[in-house]
Amino acid sequence: MLVVYNETHRQHQGAGEFFRGEMVPCYENPRRIDSLAVYLDSQSFAEFTEASRFGQEPIARVHDASYLDFLANAYGRWIEVAGDCDAIPHAWIGRGLHQGGIPTDIHGQLGYYASDAGTPITSGTWKAVQAASDATVTAAQLVRDSDRSVFALTRPPGHHAGKDVYGGYCFLNFAAIGAQSFLDHGAKRVAILDIDFHHGNGTQAIFYDRSDVLFVSIHGDPSDEYPYFLGYSDEFGMGDGEGFNVNLPLAPGADWSTYGRALTQAIDRIADYSPDRLVVSLGVDTFEHDPISRFQLKTEDFTKVGTCLAQLDLPKLIIFEGGYNVEHLGVNVANVLRTCG
Ligand code: SP5
Ligand code: ZN
């Protein structure tokens, strides 16, 4: 399998995230990719290649211009008022307490665009996420040219980012950028399968009213897990998108017997849709020893995940999302990639 490696990921390195009333070291850190890259590099099935540059155009197909402008300048504006530390908001929009305007102050804008206090904007965030977009679009191009599956080995992750909102460690939605890039190059129907432990709320929201992208997600029940506010089983899509959004929430503690059934259901729905292209948001925070998640997949279960994915006989654009047990990331991801077709 081709692996597009984005070395610039390292530019995004947050000091801490706010959790349970205190700052804790960021779970989403460069060691994740370092460890994963070393492991994949030792596997003969993985062939590394570098990203080409595509610039802002594919990003602007998914995200709002004003949001991109904010992301590009947020850190510079923040250090003027806060000094040289990561930017984190302290005030948010409350339900019913907003008429739609965007404040001018950087603190107000952070609160406007952010969905949580766990996603610091650092000096290199904008560079890193642009490079991650390049890696994604390169991978999509390679899928088209080679008719083989390609893995975008990059971070930070993307599936919690909406068209004008960041959070959940995510700033740009790479699954959406990849899917849109397929559509812009002739695909008529793209399916996105999201198997990160957390619901891909950003991806869902971006495509909620569209039928050209089917979004299917298996994740921890949001009544009990981040991102809390989307990911319920009665969210089917709206307007033209009605029937093209499928959420399969599972209770905490799900192991392969439960998970495998949901995965079969997800794959059947995707096969029914008969997409031209398939994007996989691959999080391995479904692992039993993930430090922030609550499913119970074992290392050998990731081979079963890959074998199930192989039933969808299409080259896949696979994008790395979550997974925070740094030591086991490599073997878990490799077990999916080796078997997924
Ligand atoms: C892409 C992705 O996986 N984003 C996940 C964002 C989760 N943010 C909330 C983290 C809550 C941290 N919980 C720590 C539990 C430690 N026992
Ligand atoms: Zn996750």
Image (tube, grey):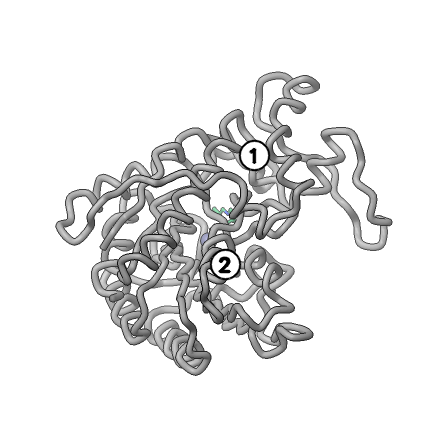
Quadrant housing the C terminus: bottom left
Most extreme residue toward the left is 44
Q: Is mark 1 within 8 Å of ligand 1?
A: no
Q: Secondary structure at mark 1?
A: loop
Residue 20 vertical placement versus 141 (above, below)? above
Residue 151 vertical placement versus 241 (above, below)? above
Q: Is residue 324 left or right of residue 49?
A: right
Q: Which residue is mark 2?
A: 184
Residue 29's disc is none
Three-letter residue code for mark 2: Asp
Q: Is residue 205 left or right of residue 293?
A: right
The quarter of the picture where residue 132 lies is: top left
Task: Provide residue 89's location: percent of width, then percent of height.
Answer: 67, 35
Q: Secondary structure at mark 2?
A: helix
Q: Which residue is mark 1?
A: 120
Determine the residue positioned at 49% across, 28% down: 124
Estimate how packed mark 1 is, as few (under 14), some (14 to 19) or many (20 or more) residues with alpha carbons within 10 Å: many
Determine the residue positioned at 63% across, 16% down: 83
Q: Earlier along the polypeptide chain: callout 2 or callout 1?
A: 1
Q: Nearer the viewer, residue 222 or 59?
A: 59
Three-letter residue code for mark 1: Pro
State which mark lies toward you, 2 or 1. 2
Q: Is residue 290 left or right of residue 236?
A: left
Quadrant housing the N terminus: bottom left
